[in-house]
Amino acid sequence: MKVAKEWRLGSMGDTKILPGSRHRSPLKRPIWIILMVSFVSLFLVCAYIYPPNSDVACYVFSSRGCKVLTDWLPPPKRELTDEEIISRVVVRDILDTPPVESKNPKIAFMFLTPGSLPFEKLWDMFFRGNEGRFSVYIHASKEKPVHVSPYFLNREIHSSPVTWGAFSMVDAERRLLAYALKDPDNQHFVLLSDSCIPLHNFDYVYNYLMHANMSFIDCFVDPGPHGNGRYSTRMLPEVEEKDFRKGAQWFTMRRQHALLVMADCLYYSRFRDYCRPFADGKNCIADEHYLPTFFNLVDPGGIANWSVTRVDWSERKWHPKSYRAQDVTYDLLRNFTSIDMTTHITSNAGGEELLQPCIMNGTRRPCYLFARKFYPETLDKLVTLLNF
């Protein structure tokens, strides 16, 4: 039996024994590496193009399931529908068109009311001496109003019945905008209710709105049951849950944004059809979601995300806090006008408070120009305290 020879280095006292060299093919290892990398790459590409549908196949990739592959691969882009393409073209052209300069820019005050306006006397004081700088429009949904101020005479528009929580509320808002847009001098549009009051004199309100570079549309994410819990997957693909927003309906908006609302057919139809009380077992209130979601989708940087109308939801009921005569004091009104941080309360368990500073044109400003809800019995106190 032959014994393999050993190589001896150095002296006998410092001897290292090395095995004899074996003959190896210099290309064998690189070929296997190339084949293995190619196989794995092909496997991953096929898995991405043809994702596994069974739980067993998913386990092959990871015990956490199929989602692992898409964590680092770019999501495939969704092809836009024809309606979305049309909508985006219209939105782009309206926003890119410079506003028409008016020699006499006005604010349109649009009142959404079931009948007579209990604070008409207060608004008369507010408007007096500012003729030519404002317009008044009234949508009276139940009965013809009785007026005490000449500024409100013959200012009713064609109106239709409005039901709280129904889509008819959105239609009434759009109807008011349509009538107000007929006057080319109207540059800013304010939606008010019959329980709204002004907190400042006319000059302050006029300068605040006319110098603003945005519309004051309330908009925030409410993850609770009365926020995203109202979302319907029937709005897909145009409205995804991640884009669904909530906000108070009492807006003020620039003329360009008012034109966008009038031009919208796509998102209007989605909310008309799928955001209704008790539809699909959900209590979706369209006037709280349509405009916030619409502007979040088409021009999120053009809105303030808060309303300039003060509403107190701290009681966390279906309706905001209402003010009686005994509640109305100088300190209450002064507090309203000094608030420079807006608060949104979510509807999830515990009701999280979301705070946001009121920033306009890069400067922190008081948030509110108007307030609600006031009972008619507060009129005399308000007239005395505000004294425009």
Image (spheres, grey):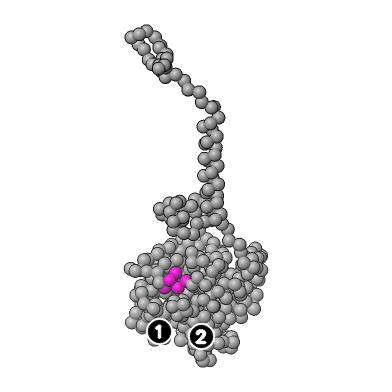
Three-letter amino acid code at disc 1?
Tyr
The residue positioned 44% from the left and 69% from the top of the image is 228
Q: At 51% from the left edge and 85% from the top edge, which residue is drawn?
A: 162
Q: Earlier in the sequence, mark 1 or mark 2?
A: 2
Q: Which residues are magenta?
A: 226-231
Question: Callout 1: few (<14), some (14-19), or many (20+) C-alpha neighbours within 10 Å?
Answer: some
Q: Is residue 345 left or right of residue 151?
A: left
Residue at disc 1, secondary structure: loop
Measured from the top left, where is residue 202 in percent x and y? 51, 74
Whether 125 is drawn above or below 73: the answer is below
Was residue 230 drawn as part of the magenta stretch in this picture? Answer: yes
Identify which amino acid the numbered label 2 is placed on: Val
* Foreground residue among 107 and 301: 301
Q: Which mark is residue 162?
A: 2
Residue found at the far top of this picture: 11
Expressed as whole percent of the image width and height from the top left, the position of residue 332 reads 36, 74
Please give the label number shown on residue 173.
none
Q: Look at mark 1 in the image and give the residue it sits on.
A: 375
